[in-house]
Amino acid sequence: MKQIKNDGQGKKDGLKFHIRPFFAKDFFKNSIVHWMFIITIFLNVADWIVLYIFIKPVDLPIILHYNVYFGVDMIGDWWQVYFLPFIGAVFFIINALLAGFFYEKKERIASYIFLLAAFLIQAGIIIASASIIAINY
């Protein structure tokens, strides 16, 4: 039988072993990338928290979308408002992965545009969530 030598470093196939080098890349050391990540994640978390505080579980349907021309055009259950921050998180993950890919290919401006798009999507979702809260209060 082959003897395995324990060098004290532990398992090299764990999740922690793979995540740490990912965040140690030059991509995350860039200050623009760093701050765009922080601000976008903050906006998404704030959206989840604000919706949790203001939208309470009810048996009646609530207004999910209001249009100036047509008035209320979408109603649904209370839990459907959480679809907005979820979509924001999905867009952020996709844009962050694309930004990292383009950053490694030395396309820094494309990377910044993807991160800016993720930020703008989050800002738009915050506005949409605020309007849902305002129309249902």
Image (spheres, rainbow, N blue to C red):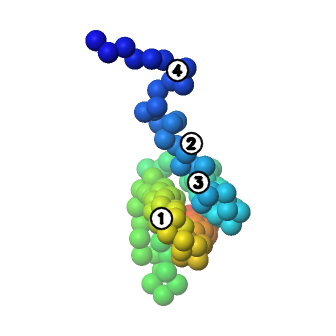
Q: CA distance from mark 4 to mark 1?
A: 34 Å
Which mark's residue is nearer the viewer, 3 or 4? Answer: 4
Q: CA distance from mark 2 to mark 4?
A: 20 Å
Which type of secondary structure does the marked residue at label 4 adopt?
A: loop
Label 1 sits on residue = 101
Which quadrant of the rendered structure holds the N terminus? Answer: top left
Residue type, mark 2 in image = Arg
Which of the labelled discs sits on residue 7, or is there none? 4
Q: Residues within 10 Å of mark 1 (few under 14, many from 20)?
A: some
* In this view, 28 is above or below 7: below
Tell me whether circle 2 and circle 4 mark residues in contact (CB < 8 Å): no
Question: Nearer the N terminus, badge 2 or badge 3?
Answer: 2
Tell me whether circle 2 and circle 1 mark residues in contact (CB < 8 Å): no
Q: Nearer the viewer, residue 79 or 117?
A: 117
Q: Nearer the viewer, residue 26 or 40?
A: 26
Q: CA distance from mark 3 to mark 4?
A: 26 Å
Question: Nearer the N terminus, badge 4 or badge 1?
Answer: 4
Which type of secondary structure does the marked residue at label 2 adopt?
A: helix
Q: Nearer the viewer, residue 89 or 4?
A: 4
Which mark's residue is nearer the viewer, 2 or 4? Answer: 4
Question: Nearer the N terminus, badge 2 or badge 1?
Answer: 2
Residue type, mark 3 in image = Lys
Q: State the image coordinates of residue 65 (x, y, percent, origin top left).
A: 47, 71
Label 3 sits on residue = 25
